[in-house]
Image: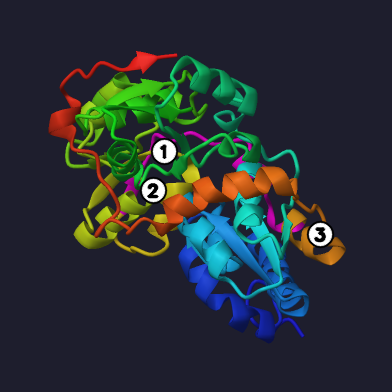
Amino acid sequence: MADGGFGLSAATARDTAGVWAKVHDHVTPLEWPAKAELIVEINRLKRERDAVILAHNYMTPDIFHGVGDYVGDSLGLAKEAARSDAKVIVQAGVHFMAETSKILSPEKTVLIPDLRAGCSLAASITGADVRLIKQRHPGLPVVTYVNTTADVKAETDICCTSANAVQVVEWAAREWGVDRVILIPDEYLARNVAAQTTVGIIAWKGRCEVHELFTAADIAEMREAYPNAEILAHPECPEDVLAASDFAGSTAAMTDYVAARKPRQVVMITECSMAANVAGDVPGVEFIGPCNLCPHMKRITLENIRDCLVNMQFEVTVPEDMAERARLAVQRMVDLPPPAVPARYDLVKARHRVAVELL
């Protein structure tokens, strides 16, 4: 009987009321009945399959708030994948994230709802490229952003995320007894890290197709239109974007910033769904564009998450010899003591030009 509002049954309306409260600004009443039914079905299937869903910050709000068991940035999700007792992990994210989950949890079944959910940054470099880099710079540690394939991680000494990149670079320099570190593949992350440390950085010309589109002119326009808004930027953006912003940090750092400060108006210079997801948890804060959509993240939908669990498709595997080598790099990252707070990028330092050797 449909008596729970929106044409939903009372049970479905009850089970999804909390989700609706967080997503109603981003999902229309016309869309909600279908999404609510899918959310209920997916949560039932998770119990039947002994599955958990890892939902990245760039997932749409219906996924993030509706079916995500663990939500957050790539570092947090990688750790949760290893801790979870579930037999099945569904990666609501992109392919390299699913590979990372499999690397850390080889005994578990790891599924991704759409095999085409890739990443421009991960596609910018291969394991063969890393082997050539190591030949060119023997003896230097290779720090690889977690946004890379298992093939690349297998050639790596330690992985990092935007939340701990400075920490990992400085750790690697100390462990290897060197003053330079190879940090690949994101050029802008490497340049922004270089502005935070005295360790020399050798970088690769890889870029995120979402973050590289932002410009300092975008920031100037936003300041003119919304002079009271606080502007937060992701470190995969160009250096001048960070320099023009009020705060720069990982997705976790941006989330913490908004939750703690609760500014009246916020501009998040990152993927669009990030702001929508944070907005669900901090009512009263107005989130203003611009933002850019990641076409790869948006391949993941409630519909294909449901199909993924119904049909137990599509499984992500990593050859064991590759996984064993990649696991060392990922585990080194996971084992590092986490920063007291998610790393932020000091924008005063970031205004100074720091030389980076670009491969």
Nearer to the camera, 64 or 286: 64
Q: Amino acid at mark 2?
A: Thr
Q: Amino acid at mark 3?
A: Asp
Mark 2, residues whose alpha carbon is within 10 Å: few (<14), some, or many (≥20)? many
- 137 vs 37, left or right, is left
Image height of 170 relative to 124, above or below:
below
Image height of 333 relative to 235, above or below:
below
Please, what secondary structure does the residue beneath circle 2 have? Answer: helix
Residue occupying the point 34% across, 43% down: 168
Residue lying farthest right? 311
Mark 2 in CB contact with mark 1 (< 8 angstroms)? yes
Calculate the distance from the C-alpha at mark 1 to the C-alpha at mark 3: 29 Å
Q: Which residue is mark 1?
A: 270
Circle 3 or circle 2, nearest the eye: 2
Q: Amino acid at mark 1?
A: Thr
Is residue 195 located in the magenta-colored stretch of the structure?
no
Residue occupying the point 15% across, 21% down: 352
Q: Which residue is mark 2?
A: 251
